[in-house]
Image: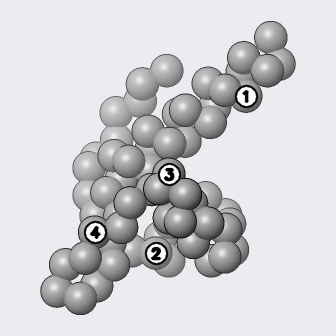
Amino acid sequence: MQTQHERRLLRRGEIIALLQLPDEKVQQLVDTRQILPIRIAGEERFDSKDLFQMIDTYKATAARRVA
């Protein structure tokens, strides 16, 4: 279920919009190390590859539960 996405660094606001989650839930993903922040010049960024890999993992897990 691998999908190719352009790799880039995302800001927290972009993560919130993509996942449609409140900031508190995104922070929970960071706290549980499901997505890892990268600090560049004092700004927090997230690797899109990590994000899409996490999404694919959640989709695969959900598909196994339904089957």
Residue mark closest to the camera, 4 vs 2: 4
User: Looking at the picture, how far across and down is residue 55, in whole percent?
Assistant: 55, 41
Tell me the kind of residue under disc 1: Ala
| Residue at the outermost left position | 41
Say which residue label 4 marks.
38
Examine the rendering and report whether any part of residue 18 can be seen: no
User: Looking at the picture, how far across and down is residue 16, in whole percent?
Assistant: 57, 70
Tell me the kind of residue under disc 4: Ile
Say which residue label 1 marks.
62
Looking at the image, residue 22 sits to the left or right of residue 36; the answer is right
The residue under the point 33% across, 78% down is: 44
Determine contact: label 2, label 3, CB under 8 Å. no
Q: Secondary structure at mark 3?
A: loop
- Residue 26, quarter of the rendered image: bottom right
Q: Residues within 10 Å of mark 1 (few under 14, many from 20)?
A: few
The residue under the point 42% across, 24% down is: 2
